[in-house]
Image (cartoon, rainbow, N blue to C red):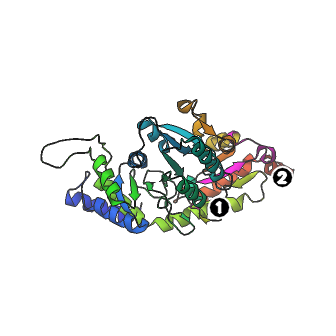
């Protein structure tokens, strides 16, 4: 947190607008519209944005929706909210995101059967964009709309373009663990102002105009609060600095581990800027000397929080039996991927502590130390 956040929150309290109406809500939407070039509506979470985005794309009971299998549950659970059916597609190793070749093959086969999906969700994982050009091409060819889940990629770019603005609907997140945060919250963006107005209507319980409480459609309690918007507005002012800080953390790890076998930073795709929202590495047990799980256990024993890369959705009990195209790449990334402490406020001393614990866990380093001790 910086100084802008406190100033804006104090203004919200002074003006006595702390619920789902207020100046900071309006300003956040206006400023985000300037940032993305699209109309924006502020919501209670990124997941709420994905849900409303799917509704805008016409997803309903029985429809199929394509989703990457390597994603967070909040990015695909809204498919089930609308009683639709997910089809999961594997990752590509170049970016860890949705594989455009597998998507192309899938859509071509479905087109021949006359059974195209209702929509495609593309998630931009860990601060890196999916390779959107081939995805846009094949989805455009078959007229399948795209919902971009840019919750983890605010501040990144794809060939100079803002992620979340390339498909039909884009969704962002201000959750507490994101590169900038409102403590919670999200935003939906679209080029169609009527769609954004509709999403705003749904987000406030779909209350029809008038003094009495009339409802002709199903609505949701999805509107962001003015206080959360105040925090998010302050955070937007330091977005570029937070991106710089996260990238510095990731690259400092990479340099510190450059002499270790079997540990590599998540790929940095050549087509855009990776924010490295999380510093993710792959562990090759054969060369590093211990498994990813062993490394996490050793870090936890030293009071260092580390986590696996997302567990693929097709391996989850909730989605047992769901159709999946491929899956081996996502399973491997989950088995060997580790997310190290990545906070923008991580000090050099704290990062050095993490680095030393990782190095201590590598038998090759331990052997060298033992030889020197003798």
Residue 13 vs residue 120: left or right? left
Q: How many C-alpha atoms fall within 10 Å of the one at disc 2: few (<14), some, or many (≥20)? A: few
Kindly tell me whether residue 306 is visible in this rendering.
Answer: no
Q: Is residue 370 visible?
A: yes
Q: Residue furthest left?
A: 211
Quarter of the view holding residue 90: top right
Placement of the N terminus among the 4 image quadrants: bottom left
| Magenta segment boundaries in residue numbering | 273-293
Q: How many marks?
A: 2
Circle nearer the viewer, 2 or 1: 1
Residue 235 is marked as none
Q: Nearer the viewer, residue 79 or 11?
A: 79
Judging depth in this view, the residue of 335 and 202 nearest the camera is 202
Residue 31 % position (x, y): 36, 66
Q: Which mark is residue 269?
A: 1
Between the C-alphas of marks 2 and 1, the distance is 34 Å
Element on which disc 1 rests: loop
Q: Position of residue 351 (x, y in %)?
A: 61, 57
x, y (%) of residue 302?
A: 63, 44
Q: Is residue 278 magenta?
A: yes
Q: Nearer the viewer, residue 282 or 59?
A: 59
Q: Earlier in the sequence, mark 2 or mark 1?
A: 1
Q: Residues within 10 Å of mark 1 (few under 14, many from 20)?
A: some
Q: Which residue is mark 2?
A: 368
Residue at 46% of width from left, 40% of height from top? 79
Which quadrant of the figure has residue 215?
top left
21 part of magenta stretch: no
- At x 46%, y 65%, the residue is 239
Residue 333, image x and y in percent? Answer: 67, 45
> Left of 264 or right of it: where is 69?
left
**Considering only vertical position in the picture, is 117 above or below 151?**
above
């Amino acid at each position: 947190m910086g100084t802008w956040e406190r100033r804006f929150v104090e203004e919200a309290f002074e003006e006595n607008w702390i619920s789902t109406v207020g100046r900071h809500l309006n300003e956040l939407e206006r400023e985000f519209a300037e940032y993305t070039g699209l109309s924006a509506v502020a919501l209670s979470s990124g997941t709420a944005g994905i849900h409303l985005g799917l509704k805008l794309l016409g997803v309903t009971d029985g429809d199929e929706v394509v989703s990457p299998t390597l994603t967070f549950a909040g990015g695909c659970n809204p498919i089930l909210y609308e009683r639709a059916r997910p089809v999961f597609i594997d990752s590509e190793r170049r970016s860890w995101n949705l594989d455009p070749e597998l998507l192309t093959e899938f859509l071509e086969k479905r087109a021949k059967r006359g059974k195209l999906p209702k929509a495609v969700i593309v998630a931009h994982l860990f601060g890196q964009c999916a390779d959107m050009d081939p995805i846009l091409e094949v989805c455009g060819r078959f007229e399948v709309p795209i919902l971009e889940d840019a919750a983890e990629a605010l501040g990144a770019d794809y060939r100079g373009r803002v992620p979340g603005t390339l498909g039909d609907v884009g969704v962002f997140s201000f959750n507490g663990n994101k590169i900038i945060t409102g403590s919670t919250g999200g935003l939906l963006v679209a080029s169609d102002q009527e769609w954004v107005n509709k999403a705003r209507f749904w987000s406030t319980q779909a209350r029809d105009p008038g003094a009495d409480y009339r409802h002709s459609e199903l609505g949701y309690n999805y509107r962001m609060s003015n206080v959360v918007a105040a925090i998010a507005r302050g955070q937007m002012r330091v977005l570029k600095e937070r991106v710089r800080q996260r990238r510095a953390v990731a690259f400092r790890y990479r340099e510190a581990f450059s002499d270790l076998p079997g540990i590599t930073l998540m790929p940095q795709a050549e087509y855009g800027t990776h924010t490295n929202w999380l510093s993710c590495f792959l562990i090759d047990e054969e060369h590093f000397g211990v498994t990813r799980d062993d490394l996490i256990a050793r870090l936890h024993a030293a009071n260092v929080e580390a986590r696996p890369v997302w567990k693929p959705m097709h391996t989850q009990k909730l989605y047992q039996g769901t159709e999946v195209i491929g899956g081996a790449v996502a399973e491997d990334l989950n088995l060997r991927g580790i997310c190290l402490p990545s906070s923008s406020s991580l000090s050099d001393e704290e990062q050095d502590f993490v680095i030393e614990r990782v190095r201590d866990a590598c038998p090759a380093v331990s052997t060298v130390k033992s030889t020197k001790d003798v």
